[in-house]
Image (cartoon, rainbow, N blue to C red):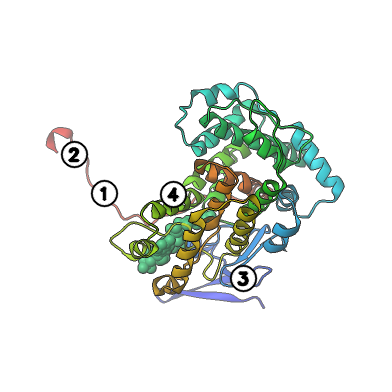
Amino acid sequence: MSEKATLEINGEKYEFPIVKGTENEVAIDIKTLRSATGGVITIDPGYKNTGSCESAITFLDGEKGILRYRGYSIEELADKADFLEVAYLLIFGELPSQEELDKFHSDIKENSVVDDDVKKILDAFPKSAHPMGVLSSLTAALTAFNPSSVDVESEEDMYNSIVRIMGKFPVLVSWAMRKKHGLPLEYGDDNLGYVENVLRMMFKNPNREYEQNPILIDALDKLLILHADHEQNCSTSTVRITGSSHAGLFVSLASGISALWGPLHGGANQAVLEMLEAIKEDGGDTKKYMAKAKDKEDPFRLMGFGHRVYKNFDPRARIIKKAADEVLGDLGVEDPILDIAKGLEKEALEDQYFVDRKLYPNVDFYSGIIYRAMGIPVEMFTVMFALGRLPGWIAQWREMRLRKEPIGRPRQLYIGENYRPFSPIEKR
Ligand code: ACO
């Protein structure tokens, strides 16, 4: 017999099925709550207890610090796979064969030219524009240049849209950076791998050929894999909810990019580096900033610390911390803010305030240090996060459409004025 949860409201009992996920996660299915009770809803600001969908893409256990894409552990993927393989895995559900991967890559390359008129839109932005705003706008603008809407009943149509955006997105990423730095816009080189191409498009000097550095390729591959998906976070939920109105893939992604920009989400990687710089400028007094973070009167938070789901450790942060040491060592870069970051982490992990609230370094705490060592400007950090998250957003959007999910439309508890008659302006 299936398990049920019983809810009692004013002496009346209602039963709801209990559903279990493949990892034995338990949920109460309240789909019939409102109709059965004559209008009662649940209220859960920030959706701390609400599952918005069923999903087969990413599993994470915040207590145990487990993160898996389609069943594969993040540790193994970061160590053994490359970003394009992981993108294929997330989007289509299985690791690709060599033949499938080659086809995927070749189709992406085939679709990696952005209409030249997009440059006119880019031209209209001031140089001071934040590249996340530019990226979000240009991604939405791609819809205008590729107007045919996706027929989600057609796997072929869906596939074509996916390879189109996988091809064009890194070009937009590089243009957002080059515009800011006054560099001529670049296209990719079909002879290169996906990640190599990203580096070339970003860093190629107009006067000389770009020389690939295997350390940078490996580091970027790893960082992109670590950011590739994270189940129903703020930006992914935004992509799913935008797409649930049957808005197209590109605009759904554009709304995800905007959600990612905020400092409480992907924007934290930029905020972490700025915070560490500020601490360094201020004489490296980590204790002072720890005290500020704990002071409830002070809005300052230790950026890169804490997570809605991870309450033990963020497995991505562990991998990135190790990678930061390796990449800086390999590149021969000595960065004093790495020491400040490690000092801050050590103090926080021993501090009762952080222990009580289960606050640990998250994925963004060390990523900026690696990006900086790679020569990526600070305002591009969140853009790099978006590049990594692209396959995750695509996978989630595709799953949502294939499962024919209903339009996302939460309820609310109204706490405003009761009815009052209109009063003409002369009487107010
Ligand atoms: N520094 C100081 N105190 C913190 C921090 C922090 N970084 N994070 C949480 N807290 C405190 C809160 O003040 C609160 O304290 P209280 O219980 O005494 O009121 C308690 O810990 C719980 O925090 P909430 O904000 O309720 O936790 P929530 O799950 O809503 O937020 C979040 C998670 C947004 C990540 C938060 O920890 C934060 O703001 N961190 C800093 C920003 C950051 O690094 N964001 C990146 C997240 S990872 C990502 O998106 C890729």
Between 290 and 423, the residue placed more toward the observer is 290
Three-letter amino acid code of the residue under disc 2: Ser
Q: Earlier in the sequence, mark 4 or mark 3?
A: 3
Q: Earlier in the sequence, mark 3 or mark 1?
A: 3
Q: Look at label 1 and name its amino acid.
A: Tyr
Of labels 3 and 2, the one closer to you: 3
**Disc 3 versus disc 1: distance between alpha carbons?**
44 Å
Badge 2 local density, few (<14 within 10 Å), some, or many (20+)? few
Q: Which residue is mark 1?
A: 419
Q: Secondary structure at mark 2?
A: loop
Q: Which residue is label 4 attached to?
A: 274
Image quadrant containing the C terminus: top left
Q: Residue furthest right?
A: 99
Question: Type of residue at label 3?
Answer: Glu
Q: Residues within 10 Å of mark 1 (few under 14, many from 20)?
A: few
- 378 above or below 9? above
Q: Nearer the viewer, residue 153 or 392?
A: 392
Residue 233 image offset from top left, x and y in percent: 54, 55
How far apart in space, not on screen, are marks 4 and 3 (Cα)?
38 Å
